[in-house]
Amino acid sequence: MNMSSYHYLGETWKHAILIVGSIVVILPFYIMLSYSLKSPGEIERNEGGFFGSQEMMIDERCAKLREPDQAAIDSARQRFTGLSDSEIYKALKAEIDTECSVRPIIFNYTKAFSEAPLLRYLMNGVIVTVSIFVVQVIVALPCAYALSKLRFRGREFVFGMVLFCLLIPVHAIALPLYIMLAKLGLTNTYAALVIPWTISVFGIFLMRQFFMTVPDDLIDAARMDGLGEFSIVWNVMLPTAIPALLAFAIFSVVAHWNDYFWPRIVVTGNRDLFTPPLGLREFKGDADGSFFGPMMATATIIVTPLIVAFLLAQRKFIEGITLTGMK
Amino acid sequence: MVGIALNGIQKSFGETRVLNSIDLQIEEGEFLTLVGPSGCGKSTLLRIISGLEAQSAGSVTIGDRPVDGVRASDRDLAMVFQSYALYPHLTVRENMMTPLRMRDLGFWQRLPLIGRFLPGASGKLEGMRKQVNETAEVLKIEALLERKPGQLSGGQRQRAALGRAMVRRPVAFLMDEPLSNLDAALRVHMRAELTELHRRLNTTFIYVTHDQAEALTMSTRVAVMMDGDILQLDTPTNVYSDPANLRVASFVGSPKINVLDGRLDRDGVVTVMNHRLQRRVPGATPQAVKVGLRPEHLRLVPEISGLGEYVGTVRHLEHLGSDVYLHVVLSDGTTTAIVRSDPDHAMGIGHGDTVRIAETRGAAMIFDAAGDRLPFEPVSESAPVSSKTQEVA
Ligand SMILES: Nc1ncnc2c1ncn2[C@@H]1O[C@H](COP(=O)(O)OP(=O)(O)OP(=O)(O)O)[C@@H](O)[C@H]1O
Ligand SMILES: [Mg+2]
């Protein structure tokens, strides 16, 4: 075998492994999307391919709710003169079935919005993730600036502590945090969803690493021009750090948009504060078990904003990552 | 236009002493260059003058105003950095506006969007814009005003950085190796432009460089710094031809000055390589001395003439077009001397050839063991001093 066929073989292996890896990652996603399009029957019987047949289906709940009783049969008697009660019942039933039949895709997605106040949840998600990110930036930028560009006693120690905090998992401190918030009477408020995340050590670390690469001369030039330290942070460092900030924004927003753990703990009962992942709970444990379609439709709706945002920011995001040397 | 005075400036970073008690008077409108090898403390001194760094001891006075503890921006100085340090997210115009905005506009007037509608702001903005345009015209960067630094070449960025420094008409310009990121041709061109700019602005320039050519060509005076001290502060000509000590003599001049071992006897006569210098050092104690001879003070003489004080073997030839520098190992076998010659004389000389070298009378400089210069006796009538009548073969 010559060099190039060795090379070729190596490449094949690499690609095979990568393809398997990407299938593992994409498969759940594929299923989510596919289920959100199919009818309950198709999901149960696992048929219909990706799109399902999209044949008209009968909304069982709608049909059950309108189940004709004796009064309905009586009032319908005029329309169906000369028919027996059971025949009238059958006719009414047929009418109801046509009224209650929909395409599965429409069924799933309208249910997603009608079964739970999904729009409200999405809005909550936006409020929470945006406030978390904004406060994180307001805290992290000055910290990162001080840790990278100001000389003061104990700087290395403080930075060491920042690194140390990176090692603490949130679940470990969830309980004390919850107790603190409960004592302050903040549970079941937006504050409870936002406050614990406002100081992001990861954000401080990431921005500090980025600021280390900003030449000192730039800061000295700003000082000569008469900018104060605070305005250097916001008027000089912030604009130069946009790519890094964008990278951080994606980390932060994705993490908190998708967070199920913390909202589940501090939001108890008050559905007005539910974030999108909590909204998914509305579909769980239905006895008939045939609500996978709407549930997956909800999940699809929840992840769509993230995917759109990522696609829009993709180029800058990757730029930001390489700039901070995270690769 | 004001002078700047430094008194006993010291600076230490932790344990390391970087500046040892610097005293320096910078005259109004002067072009003073701080030159020295890397790490000697030039930038540190400049940063202390600018206020970006605080001195450990001593005081800085600008005009009659002591500025110790005054913020960098309130010292009315402008600085040009080696890396230009332009704000990457602003256009050249905005870059140049920044120092003016910070100085002339109040806090509320600087606010985005609403700031410009506050009373007085629009008039000031108009004035500032005019100043920027005038400066851009002087530097010939009008066409670049709307570009961002990333869209400029190195030389254009250099001008933009100069522009940002110039717009606010500072009492002095501080420049830290502003040309060292440019290519050789542009650097030479910018040297001329900076000199011209200095003449036109008539403002004090304090210029830091490790490039002696820049120091010698542009300055009114040169301060040669080494290891945290100013070794000599003088005009470029004097720093070159009349160095105060051996370190200055070795640093200034390219190629380097030749240093030969010599002996000073009781009568003040210096002997170097079995040859006695004609001039005498008065009041001397006998000691070993160093004799400095610049390459241009040595010349080749024909082998057969028997003239010339030194004999040596050529080790290496450097052809620079107009000049040829010969690296010659002298007859003692250890000392290497560099001799300047013109291409005509050096023709036919090659590696390993033996050459005779004559020195220009009255050009040698004597340094004692500590490196300090020992002056020669004042020239008397009788002593034949300079060899204006060069006995070139
Ligand atoms: N912030 C600092 N902390 C510790 N030491 C420093 C600091 N800044 C400078 N030094 C030291 O001070 C000395 C002088 O530095 P300086 O930057 O003034 O040198 P320089 O003459 O400008 O050299 P170059 O020509 O390389 O720019 C150097 O030895 C340097 O290591
Ligand atoms: Mg320097």
Image (tube, coloured by chain):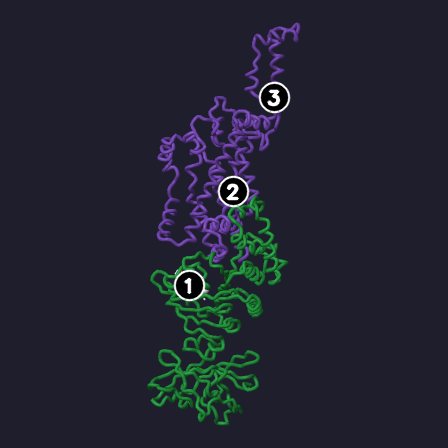
Chain colours: A purple, B green
Residue occupied by mark 3: A101
Picture residue at 57% right of the left edge, 21% below the top = A59
Whether residue A167 is visible here, answered yes or no, is yes
Where does the image place residue A2, in percent across and percent down from the top left? Answer: 54, 58
Q: Is residue B201 depicted above or below A119 in this figure?
A: below
Picture residue at 54% right of the left edge, 39% below the top = A307
Where does the image place residue B363, in percent across and percent down from the top left? Answer: 46, 85
* Viewer-closest of A182 and B245: B245
Residue occupied by mark 2: A22
Where does the image place residue B324, in percent across and percent down from the top left? Answer: 53, 81
Inter-mark Cα distance, 3 to 1? 89 Å
* Disc 1 packing (10 Å; few <14; some 14–19; many ≥20): many
* Quadrant position of ligand 2: bottom left
Q: Amino acid at mark 2?
A: Ser
Q: Is mark 2 within 8 Å of ligand 1?
A: no
Inter-mark Cα distance, 3 to 2? 38 Å
* Front: mark 3 or 2: 3
Task: Name the chain letter of the residue that bears numbered label 1.
Answer: B
Task: Name the chain letter of the residue that bears numbered label 2.
Answer: A
